[in-house]
Structures are given as structure tokens and as C-alpha cells.
Image (cartoon, rainbow, N blue to C red):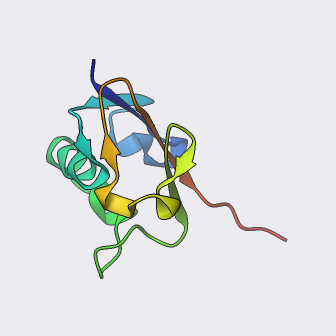
Amino acid sequence: MPVKIRIPTPLRKLTNNEEIVEVKPGTIGDAISELQGRYPGIKERLIDESGGVRRFVNVYVNEEDIRFLQNQDTTVKDGDEVSIIPAIAGG
């Protein structure tokens, strides 16, 4: 059973409008690399110049923010669900 990644609407143009993409178990970093291999350009939308997850992008593994886990080193296993959620600013 693969890891499921929920792609937010603004990034679906990069994934051929797929809402859920399946990747192999590993780490969040591995998952992002696998996404980049399949959908060139997606990594630059998620990762900043210093190699960290962009400030206004939230990544959750089974509803837990990876910033409170091991960031990109967070392990994902069979059946896990990863959600990529762009922060929304307003006022």
C-alpha cells in the first residue's frame, strides 16, 4: 500500500490535475523527490533556496505538522496520508 499525497488545487496544474498522487514509503524528502521526478517544477513550489519547506507551505503526515516531527526526515510508511496545504493570508 503506497503513501498517498493530497495535492492542493493551486499545484494540480503540475500533476495533470491529480488530487491524490501515490509514492513509495520513505521520508517526506524522498516523497518530494519522487514527485519532482514525475512532475518537474513541483519541488521549487515546495522547497526554498536553503532546502527547507517553504514558509507558507504546510505539510502534514496523518494530520501532524512535519515541523513538529522531523521535517523532511519524517518517515512515511504504507498507508500514510500526506497533505500539502498552502497557507492563506488575508486581512
Q: Is residue 49 left or right of residue 62?
A: left
The residue under the point 30% across, 26% down is 78
Q: Quarter of the image holding residue 13?
A: top left
- Return the residue found at the far right: 91
The residue under the point 31% across, 46% down is 75
Could you tell me which quadrant the N terminus lies in?
A: top left
Q: Nearer the viewer, residue 65 or 21?
A: 65
**Can residue 18 be seen in the rendering of this structure?**
no
> Percent from the top left, x then y, of residue 43?
28, 59
Q: Nearer the viewer, residue 32 or 44?
A: 32
> Percent from the top left, x then y, of residue 84?
48, 47
Q: Quarter of the image holding residue 39?
A: top left
- Return the residue found at the far top: 1
Q: Quarter of the image holding residue 7?
A: top left
Q: Is residue 78 left or right of residue 57?
A: left
**Can residue 46 be seen in the rendering of this structure?**
yes
* Vertical placement of residue 13 versus 44, above or below: above
How many circles with numbers are drawn on the protein? 0
Could you tell me which quadrant the C terminus lies in?
A: bottom right
Q: Nearer the viewer, residue 54 or 18?
A: 54
Q: Is residue 77 left or right of residue 8?
A: left
- Return the residue found at the far left: 37
The residue under the point 45% across, 30% down is 19
> Percent from the top left, x then y, of residue 47?
34, 67
* Vertical placement of residue 7 versus 55, above or below: above
* Vertical placement of residue 34 versus 22, above or below: below
* Vertical placement of residue 37 versus 89, above or below: above
> Percent from the top left, x then y, of residue 58?
53, 57
